[in-house]
Image (tube, rainbow, N blue to C red):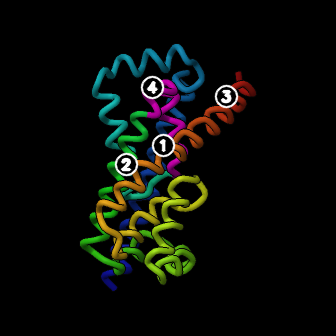
């Protein structure tokens, strides 16, 4: 019963986070911040260093408590801070969140997984852990290529015998490519979408 309540509470937090993000996006669209590069730049400049710090914290938290698909956060980083600094802030936030997820899972173990993720996802990827060396290779590939649920895999890795050193190396070396691919791909899509409504 307690697990059911905890899972429901976490799902409610995720839904609330999604609703808040949608409302903020709607406000940004109507105010012109998300449709004008000049207004967006002015808005970010008005926040100063606090804006960058809040964005990094948001990116870290959304890995630990999945609220939005990670790709949308990457897009936001590029739109808010430009391609270079957007990439840097995305990288720092996502890596920090990935390390936190591993640490939380390392302390809480497998009972935590059903509270955050669907049983279908757990069943699909838990088979990777049957052979330790196989999991490390598959995990590294999944982190490098943006094709698998990274947030879940970070939690799953925490339930294995993978060392902190190996995990950290995979995250720090593998994340740049996937973040760059997400950022570039979604930026191109965003430009096409905004051009349709311009």
Closer-to-camera residue (88/35) = 88
Q: Which of marks 2 and 3 is nearer the N terminus?
A: 2
In the image, residue 104 lies in the stretch drawn in magenta: no
Q: Which disc is residue 151 wearing?
A: none
Camera-near label (2 vs 3) is 2
Q: Which of marks 4 and 1 is nearer the N terminus?
A: 4
Q: Does the CB distance between marks 4 and 3 fall below 8 Å?
A: no
Q: Earlier in the sequence, mark 1 or mark 3?
A: 1
Find numbered disc 1 in the image and state the secondary structure of the residue it sits on.
helix
Residue topped by disc 4: 81
Q: Which of marks 4 and 3 is nearer the N terminus?
A: 4
Q: Distance between the residues labelled 2 and 3?
A: 27 Å
Camera-near label (1 vs 3) is 1
Residue topped by disc 3: 191
Say few, some or many: other residues with alpha carbon within 10 Å of mark 2 (under 14 / 14 to 19 / 20 or more).
many
Q: Identify the residue at the far front of this view.
A: 133
Q: Is the magenta stretch mostly helix, strand or loop?
A: helix
Camera-near label (4 vs 2) is 2
Q: Where is residue 94 in the image (x, y as percent from the top left)?
A: 40, 47
Find numbered disc 2 in the image and state the secondary structure of the residue it sits on.
helix
Q: Which disc is residue 176 wearing?
A: 1
Find numbered disc 3 in the image and state the secondary structure of the residue it sits on.
helix
Which corner quadrant of the image does residue 30 belong to?
top right
Q: In the drawing, does residue 111 fall left or right of residue 143?
A: left
Image: 64 above or below 7: above
Q: How far apart are marks 1 and 2 (CA)?
A: 10 Å
Say few, some or many: other residues with alpha carbon within 10 Å of mark 1 (under 14 / 14 to 19 / 20 or more).
some
Which corner quadrant of the image does residue 113 belong to?
bottom left
Residue topped by disc 2: 95
Q: Identify the residue at the far left of this view.
A: 107
Q: Image quadrant for the C terminus?
A: top right
Q: How far apart are marks 1 and 3 (CA)?
A: 22 Å
């Amino acid at each position: 019963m307690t697990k059911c309540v905890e899972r429901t509470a976490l799902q409610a937090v995720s839904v609330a986070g999604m609703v808040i993000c949608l409302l903020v996006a709607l406000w940004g669209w109507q105010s012109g911040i998300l449709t004008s590069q000049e207004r967006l730049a002015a808005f970010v400049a008005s926040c100063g260093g606090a804006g960058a710090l809040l964005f990094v914290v948001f990116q870290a938290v959304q890995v630990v408590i999945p609220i939005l698909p990670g790709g949308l956060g990457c897009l936001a980083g590029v739109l808010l801070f430009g391609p270079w600094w957007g990439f840097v802030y995305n990288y720092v936030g996502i890596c920090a969140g990935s390390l936190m997820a591993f640490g939380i899972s390392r302390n809480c173990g497998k009972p935590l997984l059903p509270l955050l993720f669907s049983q279908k996802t757990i069943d699909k990827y838990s088979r990777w852990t049957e052979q330790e060396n196989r999991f490390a290779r598959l995990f590294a590939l999944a982190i490098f290529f943006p094709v698998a649920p990274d947030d879940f895999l970070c939690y799953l890795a925490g339930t294995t015998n993978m060392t902190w050193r190996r995990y950290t190396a995979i995250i720090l070396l593998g994340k740049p490519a996937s973040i760059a691919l997400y950022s570039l791909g979604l930026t191109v899509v965003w430009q096409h979408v905004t051009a349709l409504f311009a």
